């Protein structure tokens, strides 16, 4: 609303995620870690401001190259047309003061009576609505009169055109319509003044834009210094080169143990091994019993044959 280009900036709210090296530095009480984190935030803000400055610079370059020249050319053409129209209406306004020499051409017929001319103008506008078209209905003091029907607002629009165009609403009062046309002629001088002021404003904006586009980023040196210091801290803390295990201070042997894959537990193998061991425990006892029984049979073999058979049957 002030025709200026305000710079809007806000802080980026972001959760800071600590790396392993930062956690190690915090745990060991390293003072450089706090400085590094503060620098990260400050550098991010400065980069955001620089990006905003670059975006605004590109926008100003586009305004300087395209928009402002088009606006200035259009305003100059309008001012020239308004000046020509203002010179043309001066005699018309003087005749209106004298209340004589009135003449208006409507539908190819010249009217010298104001009320008749106003009535004919209303009829001509209604005729344009009947054929559903827009076109010229008459002429007044070198200004062409065009009629159009606004279906949305249900009103007739009368466009008065010479070098520039002016639009009024056609009412039901014949004399009232002629007075509206006279008011348009009287307001041309005011429109000319407004256009001249608008042209001065646009030219000032163009000059300001040319000055702003040449200005470098105000905090470029501060950004370079902080980025250099941040690089030194990163090198000092060695955060870029150390892996997670080194950042946590883990020893080589611990790392080797941690890196060794665990062997899969085979419970089925354990059960089979236990069964095999149990069988080995039980097998010697059974064989011993069989050997003892065999020895007894061999010992009794010389006595009688029947007991031996009986013993064998028992076995």
Image (cartoon, rainbow, N blue to C red):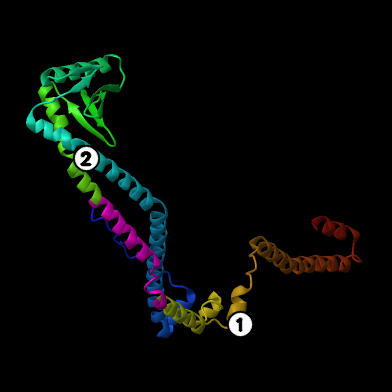
Query: The C terminus is located in which quarter?
Result: bottom right
Q: Which residue is mark 2?
A: 87
Taking 227 as reference, is 256 left or right? Answer: right
The residue shown at (42%, 81%) is 33
- Would you say the magenta stretch is mainly helix, strand or loop? helix
Q: Visible in this render: residue 68?
A: yes
Q: Visible in this render: residue 173?
A: no
Task: Check residue 202 for magenta coloring.
Answer: yes
Label 2 vs label 1, nearer the camera: 2
Residue 139 lies, with reference to residue 22, above or below; the image says: above
Q: Report the span colored magenta.
A: 197-222
* Marks 2 and 1, how far apart at CA: 100 Å
x and y percent of residue 255 in the render?
59, 78
x and y percent of residue 49 in the render?
37, 67
Q: Which residue is mark 1?
A: 253
Helix, strand or loop under label 2: helix
Residue 286 lies, with reference to residue 137, above or below; the image says: below
The residue shown at (24%, 38%) is 85
x and y percent of residue 135 in the render?
30, 22
How many numbered discs, if any? 2
Task: Check residue 228 for magenta coloring.
Answer: no
């Amino acid at each position: 609303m002030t025709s200026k280009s305000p710079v809007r900036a806000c802080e980026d709210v972001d959760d800071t995620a600590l790396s392993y090296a930062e956690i190690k530095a915090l745990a060991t009480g390293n003072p450089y870690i706090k400085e590094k984190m503060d620098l990260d935030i400050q550098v991010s803000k400065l980069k955001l401001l620089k990006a905003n400055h670059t975006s605004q610079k590109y926008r100003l370059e586009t305004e300087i190259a395209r928009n402002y020249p088009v606006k200035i050319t259009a305003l100059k053409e309008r001012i020239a047309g308004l000046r020509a129209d203002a010179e043309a209406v001066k005699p018309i306004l003087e005749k209106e003061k004298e209340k004589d020499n009135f003449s208006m051409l409507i539908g190819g017929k010249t009217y010298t009576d104001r009320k008749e001319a106003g009535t004919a103008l209303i009829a001509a506008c209604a005729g344009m609505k009947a054929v559903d078209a827009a076109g010229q209905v008459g002429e007044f003091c070198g200004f062409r009169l065009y009629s159009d029907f606004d279906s949305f607002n249900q009103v007739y629009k009368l466009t008065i055109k010479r070098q520039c165009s002016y639009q009024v609403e056609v009412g039901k009062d014949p004399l009232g319509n002629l007075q509206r046309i006279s008011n348009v002629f009287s307001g041309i001088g005011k429109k000319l003044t407004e256009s001249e002021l608008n042209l001065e404003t646009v030219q000032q904006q163009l000059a300001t834009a040319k000055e702003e586009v040449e200005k470098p980023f105000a905090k470029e040196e501060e950004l370079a210094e902080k980025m250099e210091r941040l690089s030194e801290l990163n090198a000092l803390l060695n955060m870029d080169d150390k892996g997670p295990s080194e950042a946590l201070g883990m020893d080589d042997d611990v790392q080797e143990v941690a890196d060794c894959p665990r062997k899969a537990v085979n419970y089925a193998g354990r059960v089979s091994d236990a069964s095999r061991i149990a069988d080995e425990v039980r097998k010697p006892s059974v064989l011993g019993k069989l050997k003892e029984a065999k020895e007894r049979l061999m010992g009794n073999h010389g006595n009688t044959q029947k007991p031996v058979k009986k013993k064998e049957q028992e076995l």
